[in-house]
Image: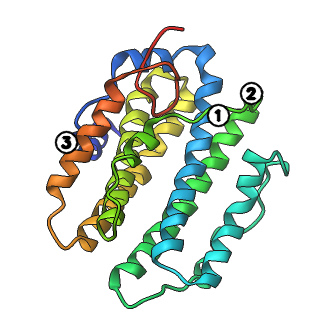
Amino acid sequence: MNTAELAVLLAPIHQFLHCRTPDVWLERAALPEQLPALLIDHMHCELKAAQSAALLIRRYATDNDSAKSLLAWLKPYEDFVYRKVGDGHFTQSKNALIGELHAKGTQPWQQQVLDKMVRLIKEELHHFEQVLAFIRQRGIAIQPLSAAGYASGLLRHVRSRDPAMLVDKLIIGALIEARSCERFAALAPLLDDELQRFYISLLRSEARHYQDYLQLAADISAEPIDGRVQQLAAIEATLILQPDVEFRFHSGVPVAA
């Protein structure tokens, strides 16, 4: 992706988000000693993104049998990360599941949620495996990491009743994906050539993920979402700009230990 293509891809994301990643976060992320935690947390983030999409499908868009298939699809990845089960080589076909899932209900958006989120899950799990390959290639020991407060800080503001709750979750999904895309692009030039190419390669899918979430929110909401987007984007920016003692892929401004 050349500079002009990158600028076109990032322009709507920079407009959507209320702030850029602070330079001090980028400086910390670029330190060689920070790379293990960065990659491990990135791997966790990819799995969490897949889990969040699967939860939306299970709650709003599919029947019980399909929900069980989704859980089985994610289980080897969850076993590896959370239970230290398996060798981290995932042999199941990510394409085989598509025909097994069925939308429930009669709302057109339910099929849209199913289609868009299944594609997102496939891509996030593929990214998970790519990050894991870098971790292994570089001899990094996989250590437990505490979760960042970023996602929980956003979810704290979700409204309590549907469809407003679902709309808020979709907008938050868009913000998280947009921030990932913005951060990948800002971080890439500071890393070695191999990782730089990898992070640039992720930008198109992350940009599409944020657009998918936002479009679903607009389709489901009975009223315009612009005002709610601005409210949640302001909260997201506050989380990114506030001091943060933990350093994670979506953490705020690093505070020296």
**Which picture quadrant has residue 7?**
top left
Going from N to C along the chain, the mark reached first, 3 or 2, is 3
- Say which of 244 and 203 sits in front: 244
* Vertical arrangement, residue 146 with respect to residue 57, above or below: above
What residue does disc 1 label?
40
Single out the residue that lies furthest toward the top: 256
- Number of residues whose C-alpha sits closer than 10 Å to that of mark 3, classed few (under 14), some (14–19) or many (20 or more): few
Give the amino acid type for the residue marked by disc 3 in the picture: Gln
Residue 94: image x %, image y %?
A: 65, 68
Residue 140 bears which disc, if any? 2
* Vertical arrangement, residue 229 with respect to residue 41, above or below: below
Single out the residue that lies furthest toward the right: 86
Give the amino acid type for the residue marked by disc 1 in the picture: Ile
Residue 14: image x %, image y %?
A: 24, 39
1 vs 2, front mark: 1
Residue 187: image x %, image y %?
A: 43, 27
- Residue at 31% over, 38% down: 236
Q: How is the image coloured?
A: rainbow
Residue 13: image x %, image y %?
A: 27, 44
- Number of residues whose C-alpha sits closer than 10 Å to that of mark 1, classed few (under 14), some (14–19) or many (20 or more): many
Are dots 1 and 2 in contact, CB under 8 Å? yes
- Residue at 55% over, 43% down: 45
What residue does disc 3 label?
15
